[in-house]
Image (cartoon, rainbow, N blue to C red):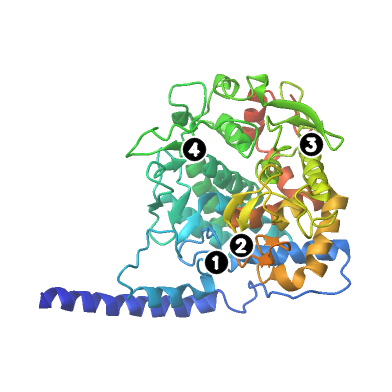
Amino acid sequence: MIKKFSFAFTFLLAANSLFAQNKSLLKGKYGDGPDSIAPVGILKNLTDDQLLETVQKQTFRFFWHGAHPFSGLALERSNTVLAEHYWDYINEAWDEPNFSHTTFGPDAGAIGGTGFGIMSTVVAVERGWVGRDTAVRRLIKIADFLINADCYHGIYPHFMNGRTGKTIKFDRLDDGADIVETSYLLMGFLCAREYFKGDTPREVYLRKRINQMWGAANWNWHANGQNKLFWHWSPNNGFDMNFPVWGYNECLITYIMSASSQYHSISTEVYNGTWTGSFGFKNGKEYYGYKLPLGNYDKDKGGPLFFEQYTFQGINPNGLTDSLGNDYFMQGKNHTLINRAYCIDNPNHFKGYSDVCWGLTAGDSYKGYVAHSPENDRGVIQPTAAISSMPYTPKESMEALRYFYYNMGDKIWSKYGFVDGFSIHHNWYAKSHLAIDQGPIVTMIENYRTGMLWNLFMKIPDVQNGLKKLGFKSPDFKN
């Protein structure tokens, strides 16, 4: 017993010493050096372009200064514990008897959110917010970590422990691969591979690592021998989750990535065997005078706005049509305008809704995490909904952005950009930031300003081949 206590005591001393060393290193790495980004308050009299730059840059701080200090993964959310306070938390929590590093706690890294953060990092380098070599080092850190982390036939889990690389299970059956989150991660990495094309040893090494992950991802495994993809696979439960990737929503990129793979591509039949092979996914109805081409969401008027944002961080919707002639820019624009018109109509009479205060999508609320939409309206506005719609509705989104910044900024503007959500009606203002909501703000504003990420992603031969295979047409490639 004494030996056990002595060993445990010695281990704790060593661990605390290691924590102290790393804490010191962390302060140096994330300090006020040339590649740190200082937060700003509300700046007066900004032009539209200056405001867009300010919002992008401060939002990017979530991924740059708020990333997991060991792995560089994007934290699932900021209100678990911020990266700059990580070592304080660990030192305090280590002595707690119920402390566990396998819960949704300070180590919970978001795989999809990390992909969004990688795309944001490309923007940050191009705009000069951080140094190119420093950014490459960060991306190598992430890639090296993931190469040695839990992975199932090349597919990563939804959440991962940012220190150990072990899967953090979502629930009892969802404790393995998540093909949708992996598609976001690799969309980000492929953009980085296209951007960092230099011949320096580090950029060459980064591309090698990305190629390893891209080549290993076995998308076809998730078809399970059927003409559809399944969202989850577990080494403990197999395909027992039995959740098909179905419908026009945030999953379109998953089918595109799955069809684009050189070594593990799905067949066209897998794509046609789900939603696109049926007219059930088409809508064609008008709401508030706007026709909605896609989405069998009659009562929901299109669903949450992230449907039009996640996939289209990399995929350019301008001129994009599928084999049935659906226009994806029209879909994104009209869905956004319907969402805004619903908020103006405000049938539930929530205080604060207006033509400049709108945007329903998934995010935090006073009721916890909720997929907000016209059908599931709790009086909560997510700033990311309107801001990330900038490519579709630049005038309306800019009006909302100015309102959020100048009229609501004292309540919702923080060192990581806008908080995740707010409700004037309930006098509730989030303290949190979510990776999957922060990322599209940076990337979709950039696509509106320069089309940068669209230009990178749409010129990738694999992606073009995948789009063609599924019957898409785009001005970005010759059919």
Above or below 339: residue 357:
below
* Quadrant of the snapshot with the N terminus: bottom left
Image coordinates for residue 341, horizontal then vertical, percent: 83, 45
Task: Give the label, 3 or 4, closer to the camera.
Answer: 3
The mark nearer the N terminus, 3 or 4, is 4
Residue picked out by circle 2: 433
Q: Which mark is residue 79?
A: 1
Counting residues from the start of the chain, the first of labels 2 and 3 encountered is 3
What residue is rendered at 83% in x and 55% in y?
A: 354
Instruction: Please state which of the two labelled residues, at mark 3 or mark 1, is closer to the viewer.
Output: 1
Frontmost residue, 445 versus 412: 412
Q: Which of marks 2 and 3 is in front?
A: 2
Q: Distance between the residues labelled 3 and 4?
A: 30 Å
For the residue marked with disc 4, what is the amino acid?
Answer: Gly
Measure the C-alpha gap from mark 2 to mark 3: 28 Å
Q: In this view, does 182 lie to the left or right of 356?
A: left
Mark on residue 215? Answer: 4
Q: Position of residue 47 (x, y in %)?
A: 89, 65
| Residue 406 spot, x, y in % from top left | 82, 69
Which badge, 4 or 2, comes first in the chain's sequence?
4
Whether label 1 touches label 2, CB < 8 Å: yes
Q: Which mark is residue 110?
A: none
**What separation in Å lies between label 1 and label 4 (alpha carbons)?**
35 Å
Q: Residue 293, can we see it?
A: yes
Q: How far is mark 3 from mark 1, CA to CA? A: 34 Å
